[in-house]
Structure formats: C-alpha cells, structure tokens
Image (cartoon, rainbow, N blue to C red):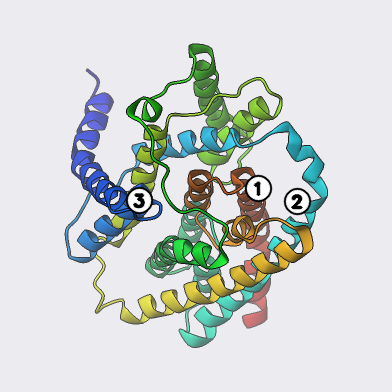
Amino acid sequence: MSAALKGRIADGGRLLPTLAVGVCGGGLAYAGGLPLPWLLGALIVTTLLSLAGRALPAPKASRRLVLVVIGVLLGGAFTPEMATDVGRWAASMTIMLLGTALMMAVSVWLLRRVSGHSMDTAIYAGMPGGVSTVTLMAADSNADLRVVGLTHAVRILVLLLAIPPLLQLIGHVSLQTPTATVARWFAMPAPVDAAMQVGAGVFGAWLGRLVRLPNPLLFGPVLVSGALHITGVCEATIPPFIVALAQVVIGVSIGVRFAGTSLASVGFTLVLALLQAFLLILLAVGAAWLAHAVTGYSPAAALLAYMPGGAPELSLVALSLGIEPAFVTSHHLLRLTVLILLMPVLLTKLQRRCA
C-alpha cells in the first residue's frame, strides 16, 4: 500500500469522530423537527464544541467530494422549461449584481472606517461570497487572513441560522422535512442513470478546473449535470440519504472553522462581523422583495439567490427545501464570476485612491 493511500486512510479515520458528532447533531435536530435538520444540527453542535475549545479535524477530501455531489444534485434541477424564463432571469440577475455592489460598498466602508482595517483586508473580508476563492486570493495580498476567515465564517453561520425564520416570515414556504420510508431514503437510480451522474461529477470537476470556474468542484458538475437534465438525457435523482450526508459534511466544515477561536481575543472582530452580516442580510431582503415585484419570482427564491455568500450552502438549502435550486445556483455562479474577475481591478483602484 502506497504512503499516499495510507495517509488518506489515516486522515479519513481521524475525521470519523467529527462526522459522528455531525450525524448525531443532525439526527437530534431531525427528531426535534428543526428546519434543515442535518445541516443546522451538524453546524450548531460542531460550532459549540469548537468555541468550547474542542479541536475537531476539518473535512477536506470529504468536503471536496461533497461539493461534486451537490453540483450533480443541483444540475438535476435544470429543466427544458427554463428557456422561457430568460427575460425574468436576466432582470433578476441585474438586480442581484446591483445589490452585490451595494453590499460591497457597505462592507468595505464598515471594515475601513469603523474597524480601521487595511484596504486589502476590507476588500477580501467584505466580498459577499466565495470564501474558498477569497481566502486563496487574500493569501497573495497584504490582507489579515484571520480577519478575512473569521468574517466569512461568522457571516455564513449567521446566514444559515437566519434563513429559517426569514423564510417563515416571508411565508408560502414549507420548512418541515418531509417524512420518507426507509426504501425512499435509500432508493438508488438505475445503473445507466447512476453511471451518467458519476460521469457528470468526474467530468464536471475536471472541466470546472480546466476553464477555471469559481469553485470548480461545485459549478463544473452543475454545468455538466444541468446539460444532461435540461436536454432530457438523464432524469435521475440522488437518494435522500446522500443529500443528508452532504448537509452534515457542509455543516461540520463550517462549525470546525471556529476551532481555536477565543471570544475574548477576537471580540471586536466578531462583533463587527456580526454587524456586517446583519446589514448584508437586510440588503438581501430588500433586493429580494424588489426582484419579486419586478420579475414575479418568489421572494424566498430571490432571498436565497441574493444572500451574501456560501454558494454551496445556500444552493444546498434551496435544493433541500425545493426553492428554485437552478435559479439560486445560477445567480451565485454569476456573482462569484463577476466578483473574481473584477476584484483585482477594484482593489488596485481603491488602493490608489487611498494612497
């Protein structure tokens, strides 16, 4: 057995306690009727343990695999009928980009004027979305990576905890997890459909990296799986138990980010991150109602599409609740692409202006 394979098996073994904690948290939330139980249950219990000083290994390889699975899942939400909604999608995406510009302005102002962070830190910590890509870009700058990482982690945590009450406030959305028989939980697609889904995941991940998509392991499979479903070649869905496991992995991957965080040492940064998250959520709610009035799309779908960050998390929420997952995913892909393309230019111009 090669050393690399032995290392991966050892890493997987060390991750088992983290996943076990996440599954237990999700199971308790499911039994208690909590909305989005597998995601929020795993998220809450691992966050509390991390803040209490318990170091939990972070899922890395498993998170990458889960991103591919989520991408294939989201691709299944694309249908041929969507071609008739091009005009409404364009209008909604325009509102989303304008809202994103406003979110960036508010975030940068808050981080620069209130906390006094450098422009590099303000830009990367204030970017509404793309935490993985943002962290890599920030590492090549003079940004304070601890502030950037903590700000994004807090924002995603607040977003996911705020989504259930916000959707209940909006109404017309069922947050109850549908009951399913054991057979339904473990129902597998036909062998041909399963092979196409695996192929969509593998080829999509490769394609996403080849064309340098933002979050390629997520959006590459989305495009390939979406093409198969929108053309009617494949109509299969992934079993519910895989969706639940994906939610657990996403939940624990957020919760363990708070490991080693001392509330006393990062108090001001934490408070500012919370304030930023709440302000951006208010802007997202306003933009969602505007989009609903202009396009007729449900405010719930617009809200998930406009939320500032966490494309895998928010797309998975849309998929789990059946709230226009293709619509939500497409908006996040566009926003991340535009932000990543414009970020270097924006940073250079703002640095010159502040020099």
* Residue plotted at (24% across, 79% down): 264
Label drawn at residue 312: none
Q: CA distance from mark 1 to mark 2?
A: 8 Å
Asked if disc 1 and disc 3 are in contact, CB closer than 8 Å, the reply is no
Task: Give SS at disc 3.
Answer: helix
1 or 3: mark nearer the eye: 3
Q: CA distance from mark 1 to mark 3?
A: 23 Å
Asked whether residue 225 is in view, the answer is: yes
Q: Provide residue 251's location: percent of width, then percent of height.
A: 35, 51
* Residue plotted at (57% across, 30% down): 204
Q: Provide residue 179's location: percent of width, then percent of height.
A: 38, 40
Which of the marked residues, 1 or 2, is nearer the chain's N terminus? 2
Q: Kindly identify which residue carries mark 3.
A: 37
Asked if disc 1 and disc 2 are in contact, CB closer than 8 Å, the reply is yes
Q: Which residue type carries mark 2?
A: Trp
Task: Give SS at disc 2.
Answer: helix
Name above or below for residue 152 compared with residue 286: above
Name above or below for residue 2 compared with residue 255: above
Q: Kindly identify which residue carries mark 1.
A: 327
Q: Who is closer to the viewer here, 110 or 16? A: 16
Q: Who is closer to the viewer here, 275 or 146? A: 275
- Is disc 1 surrounded by few (<14), some (14 to 19) or many (20+) residues within 10 Å? many
2 or 3: mark nearer the eye: 3
Q: Provide residue 144's location: percent of width, then percent of height.
A: 42, 69
* Residue plotted at (45% across, 58% down): 139
Q: CA distance from mark 2 to mark 3?
A: 30 Å
- Is disc 2 surrounded by few (<14), some (14 to 19) or many (20+) residues within 10 Å? some
Q: Kindly identify which residue carries mark 2.
A: 89
Q: Quadrant of the C terminus?
A: bottom right
Q: Provide residue 10's location: percent of width, then percent of height.
A: 20, 33
